[in-house]
Amino acid sequence: MIRKINIRDARYQLENGAGSDAVHKDPQYAYAVTDLEDDAGNRGTGLAFTLGTGNDLVCAAARFYAEKLTGRDIEELMPDFGSMFRLLSNEQQFRWLGPHKGVVHLGLCSVTNACFDLWAKKRQVPLWKLLIDLTPEQVVQTLDLSYLEDVLTKEEAIALLREQALTRDARMQVLQNGYPGYDTSVGWFNYDDEQVRTNCRRAIGNGFRALKLKVGAADPGRDIRRAHIVRQEAGDTVKVMLDANQQWTLPQAISVCRELKQIDPYWIEEPTHPDDIMAHQVLAKEIAPVKLALGEHVANRIAFKNYLQAGCAGFIQVDAVRVGGVSEFITVSLLARKFGVPVVPHVGDMGQLHQHLVLFNHIALGHEALFLEHIPHLKQHFVHPVKIETGVYITPQEPGSSCDLKPLQ
């Protein structure tokens, strides 16, 4: 039984321009942390990712949801977690503050992730193993598919998982080989040109075969110059991605992206306001064949459904510490699989949780193992930090979701 609940506000100040982008110039990385402890001493830790101010509000929302789980046995809760997720996300007073987005949904995210972590620790297995060992029916029972019935029914989700199970053995090798990573830290917005150049050389020397640069400057010439620096250092064989962090209006995005096409970007990420689906649809047509990547600030499965229906998302960047947690992450991954769009998560949690989820996506859903974002700035704060060798995530073996944090100093 879940006996103890602890909600923590954990904040970490980044230094020397790390984490900066065109909108967030001086970020303070923060987690709303939910700890659920059962009567056997197992503790599940869940994270929602924010940028400092307001993290206390997310913690308050997480506490509201977590208290509703007191006295529940995790092995009784999780086999039908989809029903609990639907119940909590539609709680009448908090739903008025969303629905399914903002502070309240981030609070639910933290609690959901703690439940999955506790479940894996109770079974003494890494989260990736717990998930891939579930049957298709068991996976779907952990999900809330409401509002998706027009494109993905429960029966269709089960059929998709069953179909992929026929070929999953061929994909198990990823557990030994590791999952490829890409380096975002080469090109934070506040870094000067020479630091970007030096970082690119270091990342390539460390084995990364894909790099990402922050763009969105008031002077588009700065973006174009820096993009050419990264492409020059990367050569023709290393992928280069560009991330505007929602900075541009649609006319600005069309103009700048046309110029940025010169460096052959693998994708352009978050070019404009995340709620403006039609703008993304227009932009995608204007800059084809360059593809758009989006999802860092897409709040829920319904919005992702609409993006996929609009046909403007080349890559889905659903983030399990920004949507409603592991359950909604898997739901969006199923949607993307049906629409034939790759999932490359945004990594607000330094890859800790997502290293498990991309393994599930590849093995159980048949998503291509493209790569997973790597950001190193908070690794030292985790009990079991991600392990990267020659640009590749090494498969975690400890029970749980790798989200246990060391005590704040």
Image: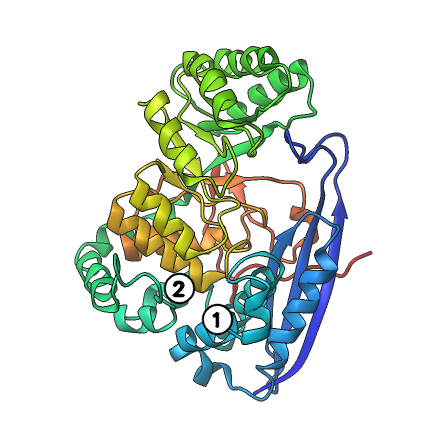
State the separation of the CA atoms marked 1 and 2. 8 Å
**Residue 317 in picture, x, y percent from top left:** 44, 44
Q: Which residue is rendered at x = 53% and y = 32% of the image?
A: 183
> Mark 2: which amino acid?
Lys
Density class for disc 1 (Cα within 10 Å; few <14, some 14-19, many ≥20) is many
Is residue 138 shown above or below 99?
below
Secondary structure category for the residue under label 2: helix
Please identify the quarter of the rendering in which residue 403 is found: bottom right
Front position in the image: 56 or 121: 56
Circle 1/circle 2 CB separation < 8 Å? yes
Front position in the image: 294 or 11: 294
Answer left or right for 400 relative to 159.
Answer: right
Secondary structure category for the residue under label 1: helix
Q: Which residue is mark 2?
A: 129
Colour logic:
rainbow
Q: Which residue is mark 1?
A: 120
Is residue 16 shown above or below 168?
above
